[in-house]
Image: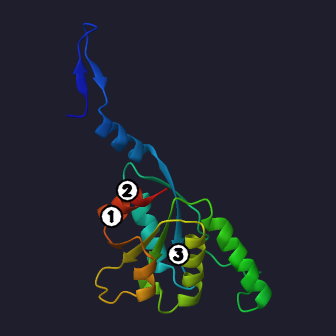
Amino acid sequence: MPYQENTQCGWHVGVLTKATREEHMAIMKSYGLFISHAWRYHDDYDRLGKLLNATPYFNWRNYSVPRHDPAIDPNTSAGDRQLRQELSKQIKPVNCVLVVSGMYAAYSYWIQVEIDIAKEYGKPILGLVPLGQDRIPVAIQQAAHEMVNWRTDSVIDAVRRWSI
């Protein structure tokens, strides 16, 4: 029952129970998320964004920057330093970090940097397992608070459960 009836006043008043208050707060909360990604590998990033956007009663803000700033060359020491600073600014305010495990093998250096920054700030990390993927990188399994199958309900429930 979503509410309890209170007839002391002569009319019915819906009173939220503790369980429904908590459910209501989870629905109303806006989640700040960082989606780990690689600039040259956007398919999973874009699909995950669409999944989150299409979920009813789920509000989120994307703190990750999906496109590469050509002014930053990550192959130079100055570019590496600048990119780390930018990633740190993006990850610091989030409630949760999502890491798609399918991209780790090709982009392990920068994904590991993102994981390390998330750990530094005490951010929960969710490892996402794409459909059909059997092998999960050990680094993601060790870093993740939870490994989640790539299904809407699994991802959303884990974000709500782990977000700080």
Label 3 vs label 2: CA separation?
A: 20 Å
Q: What is the crowding at mark 3: few (fewer than 14 residues within 10 Å), some, or many (at least 20)?
A: many
Nearer to us in this view, 121 or 126: 121
Q: Which callout, 3 or 2, points to the residue nearer the camera?
A: 3
Given the image, on which type of amino acid does mark 1 rest?
Thr
In the rendered image, residue 61, in percent from the top left (x then y), is placed at 54, 57
Question: Which of the labelled discs sits on residue 36, or is there none?
Answer: 3
- The quarter of the picture where residue 53 lies is bottom left
Q: How many marks?
A: 3
Which residue corresponds to the image point at 41% horizontal and 88% vertical from the top-left? 138
Query: Residue furthest toward the left?
Result: 1
Q: Secondary structure at mark 2?
A: loop
Q: Quadrant of residue 17?
A: top left
Q: Residue at x 46, y 47 (%)?
A: 29
Q: Residue furthest right?
A: 78
Identify the mark nearer the N-term, 3 or 2. 3
| Front position among marks 3 and 1 | 3
Measured in 3D between alpha carbons, the distance from the residue under mark 2 to the one under mark 1, in whole angstroms, is 8 Å
- Residue type at mark 2: give it: Thr
Q: Position of residue 39 (x, y in %)?
A: 59, 82
- Which tag, 3 or 1, sits closer to the chain's start? 3
Numbered tag placed on residue 152 in the rendering:
1
* Residue that badge 2 annotates: 55
